[in-house]
Structures are given as structure tokens and as C-alpha cells.
């Protein structure tokens, strides 16, 4: 049968097991007698000339397919289970999951040396359980002839990984995303270096205009790690727009106009605390606006007082800081950022005063970006990269522009990694940030 046929038989459940994920449910396919039959027949066709001795089924939906297929192939069936479920002596194999690992087991005599084996599961995603099962079969001396499944999720690395290792992988249908083709689009402000055709699929550059003028740069759109993103260089492509001259309204308006639901804003900052070292990441939860001459609101003709007690998005902050921790980046999951007008750096007296005000890091860009984003109902969270100790600290060279740029360069690979890994986890659309008015 063709893919379209199977696609119609597979039920799609949005927001399961969590919001934003589209779950492919094969129980509807199995319950349809003809669909189930063609599914087994098609898998049979892939392996019918291979003289298979054993079909290995993976806990639990893999059992349903493996046993039926084994019957048709005239083969035996062996099972792979999670640790602790099998009664006899076992072989075990650890496999990596997104965080941490899990252990699979098979009875130690489930496969005889040189038996020809295929491994069957319902769905191929990251490939962890299948790689673990391959390891078990090999420990017993079996020969892997191939891997079969109903669905392959081609936007995850499993299929490619298995093929690179030289395994024959057969599947009946593939899907290239698990997003409900919604609505999530992430604006990324700053010079993260990811706005490059090297990283983006469907790369394009868009020249937009807004009622507040042109944004600082062309908008660069595309897909990064499966997620729709839009890049904007806050200070222009060649870093020529000083903080006071940035048209913050135009930037935020343009991102809203193009459909952004969330904004991640990268920013260099100075550290006002001993424990925030140059190179550390800070995901601020508070800010102080010490700017002097910037357009602060979209509501210029009517009086609107936007609540901003919590200026940043807690959900984005949690995702970013969890991701940073998972890849061992030095980071702080809260802190107060103070935004000064610039372009000059602080005096020592100012720097010490900001410390007394309880500011932890200092920059020239977060305000009014965060307030404008809130006015338009977008979730906004800065990633602040500490580059120096400003000038308050005794025995440290006061900050210079060269120090900032040098540290930013060193940190750019970490920022890229952090953003790429965090993006697919941003799946929420409901947030307190959107309920400001
Ligand atoms: Zn939010």
C-alpha cells in the first residue's frame, strides 16, 4: 500500500504527550483488519528472501508487529524488554535518551550465534532503543539483516544514524515533522551567528518596513532544527547602529508582523557580581531601565500602562536554562539586568551604584525591547553573555569594546549550541506574557 493509505489509517493526536507535539497513533491502523494485514504484508515483502531466523520485537508495540511478521516469515520471535522484566538470565544494553539513559534486556539465549535477525518496532525516532537492541543481538552473535518499522520520523536522527552504520532500514511511511503546523515562530535578536544559510533550511531574506521605520537589518527567515525562526541583527549587519539609535519599535513590530510568537534576545553584558564570571550565561528574571532617550511604547496616542512586574518569560527562561545546564554551560537562571543608555560604559561610581540597586549584569539593549514585546503579546527572554566585570572591581581592567567583542567571539559556539538545542523544546503557546492587556 502507498504512504497516503497508511497516513489515513494513522490517527494524529495533537498536544500529546505534551503541548505542541503531534502524536502518531498506530492503534487505529492495527484495529483496521485490512490495514493491519497490508502493513504486515508490506514488511514481509522487505524481508521475505532473507531467510530470517528470528524477528526481534521491541517492548511494547513492536511485539504486535514482530510476532505476526515472524509467523508469516516462518521465523521465531524474540523480545526486548526494559530492565527487570525478564525472568531468566539476561544480556543488557544501555541506550541514550534525550536526558540520561535506559537499559534494555534480552534473555541470554534468545538469539543463537549466526542466526539471521530483523528488529521490528512501530516507530523510528532517535534510534536509541533500536541501537540498544542491535547491541543485544550482536552480543549473542546474531547477524542483523535489517530493521523494520511502520513510521520513520525523518526530522530526528535515528534513520540517518542507522543507515550510516550500514543497516538496511525499511519503513512504510515517514513524517518530516511533529509540529502541529501551528503557529510557533521564534524571533532571535542579536548577532548569534546562526543567521547563516549553513544552519538554516528554506533560507530567505526579507526587507520589511514598519510604521516606525525600517528594522535594524533584513529579516532572515528559515527553519533551524525543525523550528521556524526569524533573525534580526539589533545593531545592523555590520554592527553600525549604536544602542540609542536602534529603532526598537521597528524591530519588535517587524518581528510581530512576520508572525513571531516568542523572542530570544542575545546580548553581551558586564557582570556586576563576583560570582558571574566572564563567559557565564545569565537568564535574567528582572530588569531596571536606566535608559534616557528611547521610544518606550507603541501606545503613543492613548494611555496604556502595561503591567511589567515580571518583564521576561518564565517558560522560555526555564527551557533555556535547563538546556544550558544539560550541556554544562556555566549559567545563572536568574538575575537583574540594568540597561543603560550608552554608548559610553559606566563610571566606577555608577557601576557601584547599580550594584547597590541589586543589578547583577549591565547592558545597553534589553530596555525597551522587553516592554515593546510585552505590549505586542510576545514572550521575550534575554540570553545575557557576561563578557567582563564592568569597572567596579578592584584589580580588573575596566571594560573596553575590544574586550566585549573578543569574549563574544569565544562564546559564539556555545550560544549557537544552546539556541539550536533549546528551539524544539519551545512548544507552548499559552503564557502569562500574552495576557498583559
Ligand atoms: Zn511567556
Image (tube, rainbow, N blue to C red):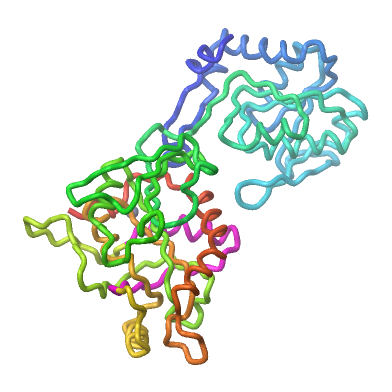
Q: Position of residue 264 (x, y in %)?
A: 39, 55
User: What residue lies at 64% left-to-right and 46% top-to-bottom?
Assistant: 97
Along the line of sight, which residue is nearer the eye, 273 or 325?
273
User: What residue lies at 35% left-to-right and 82% top-to-bottom?
Assistant: 346
| Quadrant of the rendering where the N terminus is positioned | top right
* Magenta residues (range): 312-341
Along the line of sight, which residue is nearer the eye, 7 or 208?
208
Query: Relative to residue 177, is residue 256 drawn left or right?
Result: left
User: What residue lies at 71% left-to-right and 25% top-to-bottom?
Assistant: 169
Q: Position of residue 383 (x, y in %)?
A: 43, 62
Is residue 162 magenta-colored?
no
Give the quadrant of residue 68: top right
Query: Relative to residue 288, is residue 172 drawn left or right?
Result: right
Rendered view: 22 above or below 376: above
Give the quadrant of residue 315: bottom left
| Quadrant of the picture in which ligand 1 is shown | bottom left
Is residue 319 magenta-colored?
yes
Rendered view: 75 above or below 216: above
User: What residue lies at 72% left-to-right and 33% top-to-bottom?
Assistant: 162
Along the line of sight, which residue is nearer the eye, 421 or 123?
421
Rendered view: 350 above or below 160: below
Residue furthest to the left in view is 302
Q: Position of residue 334 (x, y in %)?
A: 42, 69
Query: Relative to residue 123, is residue 107 drawn left or right?
Result: right
Amino acid at each position: 500500500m502507498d504512504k497516503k493509505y497508511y497516513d489515513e489509517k494513522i490517527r494524529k493526536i495533537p498536544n500529546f504527550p505534551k503541548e505542541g507535539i503531534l502524536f502518531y497513533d498506530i492503534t487505529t491502523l492495527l484495529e483496521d483488519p485490512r490495514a493491519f494485514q497490508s502493513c504486515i504484508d508490506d514488511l514481509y515483502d522487505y524481508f521475505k528472501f532473507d531467510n530470517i531466523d528470528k524477528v526481534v520485537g521491541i517492548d511494547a508495540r513492536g511485539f504486535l508487529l514482530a510476532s505476526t511478521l515472524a509467523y508469516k516469515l516462518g521465523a521465531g520471535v524474540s523480545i526486548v524488554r526494559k530492565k527487570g522484566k525478564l525472568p531468566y538470565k539476561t544480556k543488557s544494553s544501555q541506550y541514550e535518551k534525550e536526558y540520561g539513559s535506559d537499559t534494555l534486556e534480552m534473555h541470554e539465549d534468545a538469539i543463537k550465534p549466526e542466526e539471521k535477525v530483523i528488529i521490528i518496532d512501530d516507530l523510528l525516532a532517535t534510534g536509541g532503543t533500536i541501537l540498544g537492541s542491535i547491541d543485544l543481538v550482536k552480543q549473542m552473535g546474531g547477524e542483523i539483516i535489517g530493521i523494520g518499522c511502520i513510521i520513520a520520523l525523518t526530522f530526528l536522527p535515528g534513520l540517518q544514524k542507522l543507515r550510516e552504520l550500514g543497516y538496511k532500514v525499511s519503513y512504510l511511511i515517514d513524517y518530516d515533522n511533529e509540529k502541529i503546523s501551528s503557529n510557533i515562530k521564534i524571533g532571535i535578536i542579536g548577532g548569534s551567528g546562526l543567521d547563516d544559510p549553513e544552519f538554516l533550511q528554506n533560507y530567505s531574506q526579507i526587507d520589511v518596513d514598519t510604521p516606525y521605520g525600517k528594522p535594524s537589518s533584513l529579516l532572515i527567515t528559515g527553519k533551524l532544527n525543525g523550528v521556524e525562526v526569524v533573525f534580526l541583527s539589533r545593531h545592523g549587519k555590520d554592527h553600525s547602529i549604536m544602542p540609542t539609535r536602534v529603532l526598537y519599535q521597528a524591530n519588535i513590530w517587524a518581528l510581530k508582523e512576520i508572525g513571531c510568537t516568542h523572542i530570544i534576545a542575545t546580548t553581551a553584558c558586564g557582570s556586576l557580581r563576583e560570582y558571574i564570571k566572564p563567559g557565564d550565561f545569565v537568564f535574567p528574571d528582572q530588569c531596571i531601565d536606566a535608559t534616557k532617550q528611547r521610544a518606550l511604547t507603541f501606545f503613543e496616542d492613548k494611555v496604556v500602562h502595561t503591567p511589567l512586574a515580571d518583564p521576561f518569560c518564565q517558560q522560555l527562561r526555564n527551557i533555556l536554562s535547563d538546556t544550558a545546564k544539560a550541556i554544562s554551560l556555566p549559567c545563572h537562571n536568574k538575575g537583574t539586568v540594568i540597561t543603560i543608555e550608552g554608548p559610553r560604559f559606566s563610571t566606577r561610581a555608577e557601576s557601584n551604584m547599580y550594584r547597590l540597586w541589586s543589578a547583577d549584569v549591565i547592558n545597553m539593549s534589553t530596555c525597551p525591547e522587553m516592554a515593546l514585546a510585552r505590549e505586542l503579546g510576545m514572550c521575550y527572554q534575554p540570553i545575557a553573555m557576561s563578557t567582563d566585570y564592568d569597572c567596579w572591581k578592584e584589580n580588573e581592567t575596566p571594560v573596553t569594546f575590544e574586550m566585549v567583542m573578543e569574549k563574544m567571539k569565544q562564546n559564539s559556539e556555545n550560544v549557537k549550541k544552546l539556541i539550536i538545542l533549546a528551539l524544539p523544546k519551545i512548544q507552548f503557546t499559552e503564557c502569562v506574557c500574552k495576557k498583559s492587556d
